[in-house]
Image (cartoon, rainbow, N blue to C red):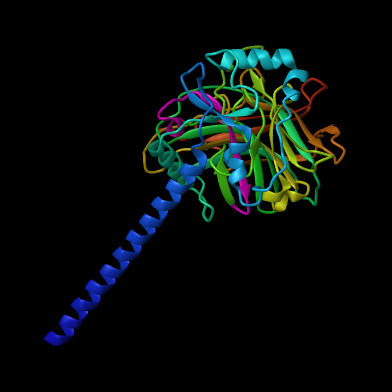
Amino acid sequence: MSSMFFILILCSCFLSFFTNGVEVKLAVKEKIELHRKFKLYNKPAIEEIKTFNGDTYKCVDFYKQPAFDHPLLRNHSYHPNLDQYKLQNVSQQSSWISELWANGKGCPDGTVPIRKYTRKEFIRVHKLFQKLYPSDAPVPGRFRATVHTKDGPHTFYGGSAALSVYNFAVGEGQYSASYLTLRAAQDQLQYGWWINPSMYGGDGTTRLFLSTEVEKTKCWNLMCGGYVHTHKSIPLDAPITRVTRRGSISPIEIVPKIVKSPSTKQWNLFITHDIPLGFWPNEVLKGLSGPAEYLEWGGEAYNPPDKGLSGPGMGSGYFPIGIGSHDGYARVMARYDEAGTYFNMGNGELETYSDNNDYYTVIDGGYSDEDFGHIAYWGGKGKQG
């Protein structure tokens, strides 16, 4: 009996040692991988500049940006088209850039702005993003209220819309976003604005954000290779200088557009006034190496279920009432054909979706007129009490 007890104790100790050993090895492996990713991200700066709210960006040589560390892009032949910034929408770009940067001009020619992180900050936000967007499981506390194209088959070569931009209080660990999404198979491209204090050291400024998902592996902004940034003075994750005051007859908008180039067949990213920001080379995409199958416009919010917090808001921070001056919205929602031709989404082409109508709702306003096109409204206050 005593010998059997002794054997059980030995087995228990061995299993404990084995389990702890595996955990230690996994922790060490994760740490090594995070340090490797930081080294790839942390490129030498030709110059450092600050935004109006104090964010620091490195002006990094175009050819040294993280995208070109992707194994499929190491023998690339891409180059920045420096003339495009001088020829397209000069006045609109100048206004945006002068408001954004403390130096009033952004980065020098031949460089791109990349947000500066310390090693500790990089590891913290990388782990947080992995927690918010795991590749293998739904996330409790995350909700969407959107309009999207009906089940296909469809072929879309782009999507766009004008999104109203707001700012409101978002708690620790929470975020709120409004965006445009394109999807095919297990690939997804998403661009819009969000309020995400946890990603920015507690700063609740409204910012642009990009999410790239390839075969269910999702990454954020320039944290991974694949997306090539080309604009020297507008960062991918720029803080937004002006936001809408609810009730204003002139809401502040951004206009994200993702369109597959008829000539290069690459997906190109544009922001308001058709300002080109960058592109995704075909080599790094799988499902979206061809056309998109699905378009979506709407909002997403996250409230960690273990924190006991109210909110967060979505859209304008209030439930939609179908009035553009009061709601988070997307107007002139559009799709593009293979030639790059623009088409307003028509009545009957979209359907609505909401995870929880007690927290967030969405209204499909349909096609209105040439100025507003097809419009949808979304929002809510989230969990209360």
Percent position (x, y) of residue 349?
A: 79, 40
Q: Is residue 376 above or below residue 1?
A: above
Q: Is residue 185 magenta?
A: no
User: Which of the pair 358/14 is nearer the observer?
Assistant: 14
Q: Is residue 198 magenta?
A: yes
Percent position (x, y) of residue 321?
A: 63, 24
Percent position (x, y) of residue 341?
A: 86, 34
- In the figure, residue 25 lies in which quadrant? bottom left
Locate the N terminus by quadrant: bottom left
Q: Is residue 202 above or below residue 146?
A: above
Residue at image coords 74%, 29%: 81
Percent position (x, y) of residue 109?
A: 65, 23
Q: Is residue 359 above or below residue 214?
A: above
Farthest-out residue, left: 2
User: Which of the pair 52/384 is nearer the observer?
Assistant: 52
- In the figure, residue 276 lies in which quadrant? top right
Q: Decide if residue 245 is in sight here.
A: no
Residue at image coords 64%, 48%: 74
Residue stretch in magenta: 197-216
Locate the C terminus by quadrant: top left
